[in-house]
Image: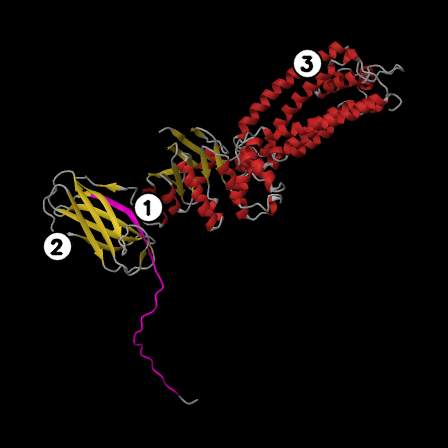
Amino acid sequence: MTTALEVEDVSKVFRLFRERPSSLKQRVLSGRMRAEDFWALRDIAFEVEEGSSLGLIGHNGSGKTTLLKCIAGILRPTSGVIRYRGRVAALLELGAGFHPELTGRENVYLNASFLGLSRKDTDRVYDDIVAFAELQDFMDNQVKFFSSGMLVRLGFAVAVHVEPDILLIDEVLAVGDEAFQAKCLDRVRSFQAEGRTIVLVTHALDTVREVCDRAVMLDHGRIHAIGLPDDVVREMRYVLLGGVDPGFVAEEGTREAEIAAVELIRASGAGEGPVLRDDPLTIQIDVRTNEPVDDLDVDFAVLDGATNHPVIEERTSTHGIVIGRFDGKKRVRFRIPSFPYTAGKYWVTVGLSSRATGHLFHVQTQRYLFEVIEVPRVQEHIEVVVEAEVEDL
Amino acid sequence: MGNSTPHYPVFLLSGLLVWNLFSVAVGNGTRSVIDNGNLVKKVAFPREILPLSVVGVALVDFVLQSAVLLVFILATSYGFHVEALVLYPLSFVTLVVFTTALTFWVSALNVRYRDVQHLIGLALLVWFWMTPIVYPGGIVQEKVMGSTAPWLWTVYLLNPLMPIISGFQRALYFYVSPDGIRVLPEGSVLWLAGVILAVLAFSLLLLLYTWRLFFRLSGDFAEEL
């Protein structure tokens, strides 16, 4: 695999002036300027493989958009180098690169030329762009009359039709309706299938988990976490919820015994999909040993995704199960006959440890996720005591 | 003035066209980057296109206006001075280089200091009257050289636009009118060509400097706007 995008120790400093001279007059009249440095990005380094997708997440003001603008070449990093291969198309903001006074048609050509497409090339893809944006009837109107959803559709349509090698997307898709978002995600997937590279900035953490191969979490301009989307998103949720940050530990343990596979089996027997409230749920853990283990204890915890508090914690030892010395594979099932908690997302943590010493063999912290939904049900008829009385007034 | 300057429209237009190109490019150039702020902030593209496009627009104006001048020259059945016509391309190239250099400079500077556009407006006004466009330079020379401070003429010549405009006027207008009135400043074609070449050399250095300055500052355009 070759590297499509390489970000090497990039830092970006914004100078915050207390009394910023914005005219020559002030500059001449005031003596020295007092300025404070604000590090929007600090020593950011990562690589994106060709054909892979990277999700950039972080709270507001963490530097995501600054980083994307540096990659797009709009901002120049204070230090560090950004290298990339091929054509880069950036979808940064609503209506970016559109001129409000020009018609939709003219703006398509303008926008395409910014992205490096000649007039002839644009002629070729023009109809596809319009069809994708579903704006056939509006192309001869000035874009200042367009709604924000129409602008995003047109912008996205142009960006994906210029066939960029690297597509940078900032939180713009959130504006479109669900059907268009689904269409965009479809297009993003076909992009991935064509082996193009995508960098996606979003607050929609589930999109990152669905679409991206890797994720980077920024915090105050630094890389806080980098790795698989599941791990990074989990870390992001920790930080967002303001809980005590346990540090970014995806997995730990000495691995004499390993978690080989975990499956959350729904009532239907499927391993995926939502869990209905009060439905049964089985957590099935496959264990594999790398060397003989004497006294294995398998445990799991279900954590409420909204608060990160454990709602269920169980281990085999408390059920009186003794797993003797063994070398090979074993399957452990925890059956919850009826999952009682309300609708929402729940994380599952799975661990293997030693009964006697508590030594950790392998822990996967909040690696697995399931969603509980509530389906309105017809109320069962039960006896309700009703009292009746009449009084004079 | 009409009396002392025969074929005044030809004289006026040959200088005014040059001035128009210069002042339109520099005047609009100051606002070229900030007027396109929404593009600069959101789209990556070579920023130098913005001032260059302003110069391009001014050039189109220049060509159209030149057609008007040509009509005047033909209408007044006034012939070119073939030996001086060589000054035309030389002056033109110098004009474009000098104008481009200044446009780069003011467009980049105005992003940082927004009052540059007002200062430039004032400066252009003064500059216009410092340059022999509506009045004949030859008369200035005559008056100054005959005064007690002939060195003022040298100061007058330091204006880079002065040789450029004189070059255009020399090529399209005449040096000495049939009535013996000297409209343009004294000096041979060769001498004037030498001065214009010096201005060209200066303009190229200036362009190199302002081009670099523009590229240095353009990295910060997106955050300054």
Disc 3 crowd, CA 10 A, few/some/many (<14, 14-19, 20+): some
Q: Are marks 3 and 2 on the same chain?
A: no
To which chain does the residue with label 2 belong? A
Where is residue B47 shown, x and y percent of the image? 56, 30
Task: Tell whether B16 sits left or right of A102.
Answer: right
Frontmost residue, B18 versus A290: A290
Q: Which residue is mark 2?
A: A320
To which chain does the residue with label 3 belong? B
Residues tagged 3 and 2 counted as in contact (Cβ below 8 A): no
Residue B127 seen by the camera:
no
Which residue sits at x=35%, y=50%? A241
Q: CA distance from mark 3 to mark 1?
A: 69 Å
Task: Report the span colored magenta.
Answer: A362-390
Task: Tell whether B23 sits left or right of B72.
Answer: left
Please say whether residue B196 is one of the residues in the magenta stretch: no
Q: CA distance from mark 3 to mark 2?
A: 100 Å
